[in-house]
Amino acid sequence: MEDSYEHTMGESQTGGITLSSFIDTWVDEVYLYLDEIFVKESEIKIADAVLTLFKTRHDLEIFKKKALYIYIREMTDCQTPQLTRVISILKEHFKEKHQHYYDNGYLNNKVL
């Protein structure tokens, strides 16, 4: 599975970066703006848990969505609707960032 996100993206524009490198960069940038993206302390805690999973993805032994949801819920003591809301926001940020890189060949500096 690791090989699937190690392929380069955007080779024709800038030489490309791997999806793995892109995810690492995105996670670091989201951490910089975490308190601007999420206002509630509980949402920040959930986002931190999700981002931690992204950072430690190489060490994960579970890949099923339901199992990951349960794992995050146990880490944060949150309800599924709260978790789903935070993940939806993070997903939108990721898609915007990825689309920007795909269209322009470089990463913009701000997640927001």
Image (cartoon, rainbow, N blue to C red):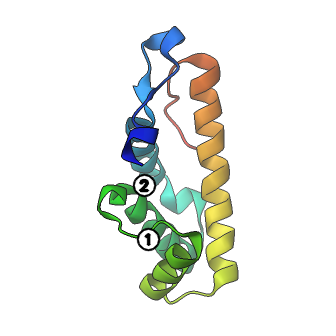
Amino acid on which the number 2 mark rests in the picture? Tyr
The C terminus lies in which quarter of the figure? Answer: top right
- In this view, which residue lies farthest toward the left? 59
- Image point 42% across, 70% down: which residue? 62
Q: Which residue is mark 2?
A: 31
At which x and y percent is residue 40? 59, 75
At which x and y percent is residue 81? 70, 80
Q: Quadrant of residue 49?
A: bottom left
Q: Which residue is mark 1?
A: 49
- Image point 57% across, 74% down: which residue? 43
Position of residue 32 in the picture relative to residue 94 (left or right): left
Amino acid on which the number 1 mark rests in the picture? Ala
Position of 111 relative to 78 (above/below): above
At which x and y percent is residue 34? 49, 59
From the viewer's side, name the closer residue of 26 and 5.
Answer: 5
Task: Indicate the secondary structure of the residue bearing disc 1.
Answer: helix
User: Does the CB distance between marks 2 and 1 fall below 8 Å?
Assistant: no
For the residues marked 2 and 1, what is the alpha-carbon distance in whole angstroms?
11 Å
